[in-house]
Amino acid sequence: MNDREQSLTQGNIVSFLGEIFERRGGGEYLGEPVTMAEHMLQGAAIAEAQGEPEEIIVAALLHDIGHFTSEFGTFRMDDTEDRFHEDAGAKVLERFFPKIVTDCVRFHVAAKRYLCATRAEYFDLLSAASVHSLMLQGGKMSPDESAMFEKNPNIEAIIKVRYLDDAGKDPEMDTPDFAHFAPMVQRVVDRHLPQQS
Ligand SMILES: [Fe+2]
């Protein structure tokens, strides 16, 4: 953990995340026609419009935060392939967010592999870039892997966030910015952690 991560608290985690959106979110999103920030904001906005619980909206908002790997000190010069952004994101978030949120982040790639194995129509929904990364990520799950995956008590939430991930790639969609979601992110943190005096 780097110094910046060490200094994160219940009181500054939300502005830390907001700064990441602001400074880094304009970057390209892996060959999709939207930026990283647009992609995550779209997932969150769709979740909000569907009336999903705040934990789901926040998970969609933060699911790819681990792509900003240098923020989290996980980037290494000898990395050649998949940097397991889902783990990097979940690791920073788990100090502040409930397991339902971190499971949705940690397993959003696994959920793609699971859905490809278990729902015939799901594969057609994937963008070309997502199909490409699927190969790097291990392809569809085997029956044994799928059976294991189904044991996660948060599987419904994980799958829901995966569909929000796939939906958030629309170059025409307008969304609110991070500031709109910030109070909700703080509420999810505050419900999870004991209040600071
Ligand atoms: Fe994503």
Image (spheres, rainbow, N blue to C red):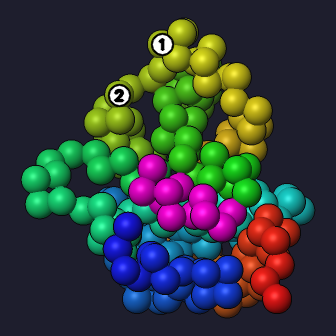
Q: Residue at x 34, y 42 (%)?
A: 133
The 10 Å Cα crowd at callout 2, few under 14, some 14 to 19, many 20 or more, is few
Say which of 108 and 98 sits in front. 98
Q: Is mark 1 within 8 Å of ligand 1?
A: no
**Residue 97 in the image, given as x and y percentages of width and height:** 69, 63
> Is 37 in the magenta?
no
**Residue 128 in the image, given as x and y percentages of width and height:** 38, 45
Our reading of the magenta stretch's main secondary structure is: helix
Q: Amino acid at mark 1?
A: Ser
Say which of 135 and 181 sits in front. 181
Residue 142 numbered tag: 1
- Image check: 181 left or right of 13? right
SS at badge 1: loop
User: What is the distance, in whole Å, between disc 1 and disc 2 at their CAs?
Assistant: 10 Å
Residue 152 numbered tag: none
Compared with 30, 175 (above or below) is: below
Q: Residue at x 61, y 64 (%)?
A: 95
Say which quadrant the C terminus sits in: bottom right
SS at badge 2: loop
> Is 96 in the magenta?
yes
- For label 2, the residue is 138
> Is residue 124 visible in this depiction of the protein?
no
**Residue 126 in the image, given as x and y percentages of width and height:** 49, 41
Q: Residue at x 38, y 67 (%)?
A: 1
Where are the magenta residues, as a range? Answer: 87-97
Q: Amino acid at mark 2?
A: Gly
